């Protein structure tokens, strides 16, 4: 995979010893003056100190730098956790020579433990000295933000916008505690296009809705979820304006990058052996379609059946039936497993055979198509199966 550097965006990583030994766990991202920044954060009521602080800082200044760590979430840490987050931002601001409000903090890892500020003090100066626009800086950073991830998630695209070539490069981390209520665990996407903040925020909100907000591993929304989109404006071009052809072109590429990153999270979900696409169409509203999709996607019985490659479609049927949809007419429900009809008009399909069902779920990629009626509403949610390994990973997470 080719990783395209983004002009005006520099990164560096360091092994600070926050939680892990002999691996990078600290990242600094710096954007040039004049860059635009858009963010979305978790809606969890116990949002972490760095999330709370980032929300304050972004209202005070245009961000110039981001301080990211893995191994410690700094969540559920009370007043001391907030003071520590502030102190870490002050340390980076002091080295970069910017205001503390121009630094946004991001953390991921174990909840409820105080972050070791002293290791930030030691690691930040050297990290800043290594700041680079090069592709390998992105590659190293994508690894540094991992926790239970088994592979880094990094994607890059080029796009022709308004006669100019622009780059869009993004990285994400996440494998468990995934049902984002805005974004994912952590994601950072950058472009060198010229896009003002209001337009950039609109682009991010639209793309997030059908990418990171359409994945679930276990139905748990993290305390630290955050997604950030940067536009350095380093390309000599007119600003991308909402409603324009250029806006639509950029939005298409951005959404593709974010959907690919979101799907990479599901493919790397803790203990996952199956990548499951759930398409729901025909509901009275998008909300009804999503309610059915998530009820099926997060059903432990459905997920364990698919882990076993067992076409136990009764579990899917039951999940559809218990979804919080008051207008559901079961006589209009059709369900297919990888194209094999299992339920038609609310009844077992007359042509269905167990052999066909077993063949449908034997592979690693499974698509569940659910029709609720004849409306034009349609949604897609991506999820994983539930395996023995998922239980082991989460049982041993702090040991």
Image: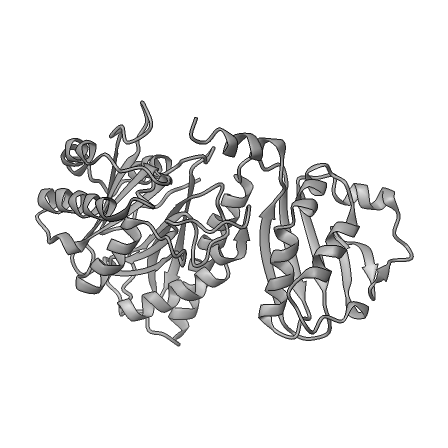
The residue that appears at 61% across and 63% down in the rendered structure is 291
| Nearer-the-camera pick, 108 or 274 | 108
The residue that appears at 77% across and 45% down in the rendered structure is 360
Image spot of residue 317 (x, y percent): 76, 56
Image spot of residue 266 (x, y percent): 54, 45
Direction from residue 349 to residue 91 in the image, left or right? left
Can you see residue 162?
no
Q: Is residue 268 above or below residue 314?
A: above
| Nearer-the-camera pick, 152 or 48 | 48
Direction from residue 236 to residue 381 in the image, left or right? right
The residue that appears at 58% across and 52% down in the rendered structure is 382
Q: Is residue 320 above or below residue 373?
A: above
| Nearer-the-camera pick, 383 or 244 | 383
Image quadrant for the N terminus?
A: top left
How are the colours assigned in the image?
Answer: one colour
Q: Determine the image quadrant of residue 287.
A: bottom right
């Amino acid at each position: 995979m080719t990783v395209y550097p983004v002009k005006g965006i520099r990164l560096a990583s360091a092994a600070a010893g926050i939680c892990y030994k002999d691996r990078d766990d600290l990242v600094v991202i710096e954007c040039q003056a004049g860059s635009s920044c858009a963010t979305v954060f978790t809606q969890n009521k116990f949002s972490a100190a760095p999330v709370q602080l980032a929300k304050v800082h972004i209202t005070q200044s245009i961000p110039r730098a981001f301080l990211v760590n893995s191994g410690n979430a700094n969540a559920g840490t009370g007043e001391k956790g907030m003071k520590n987050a502030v102190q870490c931002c002050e340390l980076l601001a002091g080295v970069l020579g910017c205001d503390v409000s121009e630094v946004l903090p991001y953390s991921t890892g174990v909840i409820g433990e105080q972050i070791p500020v002293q290791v930030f003090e030691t690691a930040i100066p050297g990290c800043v000295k290594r700041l680079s626009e090069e592709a390998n800086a992105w590659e190293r950073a994508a690894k540094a933000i991992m926790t239970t991830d088994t592979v880094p998630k990094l994607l890059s695209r080029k796009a022709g916008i308004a006669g100019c070539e622009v780059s869009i490069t993004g990285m994400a981390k996440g494998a468990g505690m995934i049902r984002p209520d805005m974004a994912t665990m952590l994601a950072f996407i950058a472009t060198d296009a010229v896009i003002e903040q209001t337009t950039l925020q609109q682009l991010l909100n639209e793309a997030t809705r059908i990418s990171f907000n359409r994945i679930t591993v276990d139905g748990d929304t993290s305390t630290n979820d955050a997604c950030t989109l940067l536009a350095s404006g380093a390309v000599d071009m007119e600003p991308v304006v909402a409603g324009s052809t250029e806006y639509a072109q950029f939005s298409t590429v951005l959404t593709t990058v974010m959907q690919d990153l979101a799907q990479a999270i599901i493919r790397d979900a803790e203990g996952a052996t199956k990548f499951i696409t759930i398409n729901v169409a025909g509901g009275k509203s998008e909300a009804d379609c999503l309610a059915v999709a998530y009820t099926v996607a997060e059903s432990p019985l459905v997920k364990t059946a698919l882990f076993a490659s067992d076409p136990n479609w009764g579990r899917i049927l039951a999940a559809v039936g218990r979804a919080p949809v008051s207008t559901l007419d079961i006589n209009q429900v059709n369900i297919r497993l990888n194209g094999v009809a299992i339920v038609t008009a609310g009844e077992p399909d007359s042509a269905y055979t167990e052999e066909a069902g077993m063949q449908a779920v034997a592979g690693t990629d499974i698509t569940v198509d659910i029709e609720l009626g004849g409306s034009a509403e349609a949604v897609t949610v991506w999820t994983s199966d539930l395996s023995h390994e998922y239980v082991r990973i989460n049982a041993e997470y702090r040991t």
